[in-house]
Amino acid sequence: MSLPILYTFRRCPYAMRARLAVLSSGLQCELREVILRNKPPALLTASPKGTVPVLITASGEVLEESLDIMRWALEQSDPSDYWPKKDDLRSLSLVLIERNDGEFKRALDRYKYPDRYQHEADFDNAADYAMKYRRFGAQILEDLNQRIAGQGYLLGEQASLVDLALMPFVRQFAHTDKAWFAEQNWPALHQWLQQWLDSALMQSVMNKYTPWEEGEAPVLFGG
Ligand SMILES: N[C@@H](CCC(=O)N[C@@H](CS)C(=O)NCC(=O)O)C(=O)O
């Protein structure tokens, strides 16, 4: 039987969350590392929108949103109970992910790469623009810190899909200026991030793979 195929890019936070979920599910996939500026035709044929991650199931269904891939994996096998059973926790997860992928990602991109946004109406100069968006992002991080404080994870005392979904983005924000991040009064968030970064799960997810080429022997991931 053919394995599901996961097109991914090591440093993409959306692809990271998909790999985190697949790995924690224990399912096995064929991993295809992609270079974003040179996407393989097989990926674009399966998913013309051209983003990663993309997962093609064994039956040929194409999942082209990271959250769909996470749910696809955890709905089949979830040994760590990451996908909450209760409706209210599922709804809260989706609200937090939507804010992350919308407002927070927007702030992250403008803080990290201000020069790319010179055409925007509120752009004055790169340094001030970056700081403005760092402040927006920091408000959300402040909220995450409060949610984690006293319970350890975003939804409670147990890690969940929402921790996996947000962590790669918090990591990117933190790594943009590590000294600044470390100075912020967010002890719970600092500990939460460090714990994920040190985890065996995250270490495996960050393994390096050479970019995939058509006709190569499959690279197995997870399982
Ligand atoms: N909503 C998508 C977003 C995925 C996304 O934007 N991925 C970026 C890389 S981090 C991408 O593939 N961009 C296309 C490109 O840079 O060519 C998801 O959740 O999977």
Image: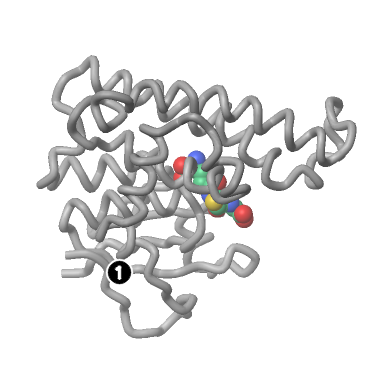
Q: Secondary structure at mark 1?
A: strand
Whether residue 49 is visible here, answered yes or no, is no
**Residue 217's spot in the image, x, y percent?**
33, 84
On the image, numbered disc 1 is attached to which residue?
30
Q: Amino acid at mark 1?
A: Glu
Badge 1: how crowded within 10 Å, few (<14), some, or many (20+)? some
Front residue of 184 and 84 = 184
User: Where 56 falls versus 102 (above or below)?
Assistant: below
The residue sitting at 26% across, 32% down in the picture is 152
Q: Quadrant of the N terminus?
A: bottom left
Residue 116 appears left or right of 82 = right
Residue 4 appears left or right of 188 = left
User: Where 46 falls versus 88 (above or below)?
Assistant: below
Whether residue 6 is visible here, answered yes or no, is yes
**Residue 115's spot in the image, x, y percent?**
81, 46
Direction left: furthest residue: 79
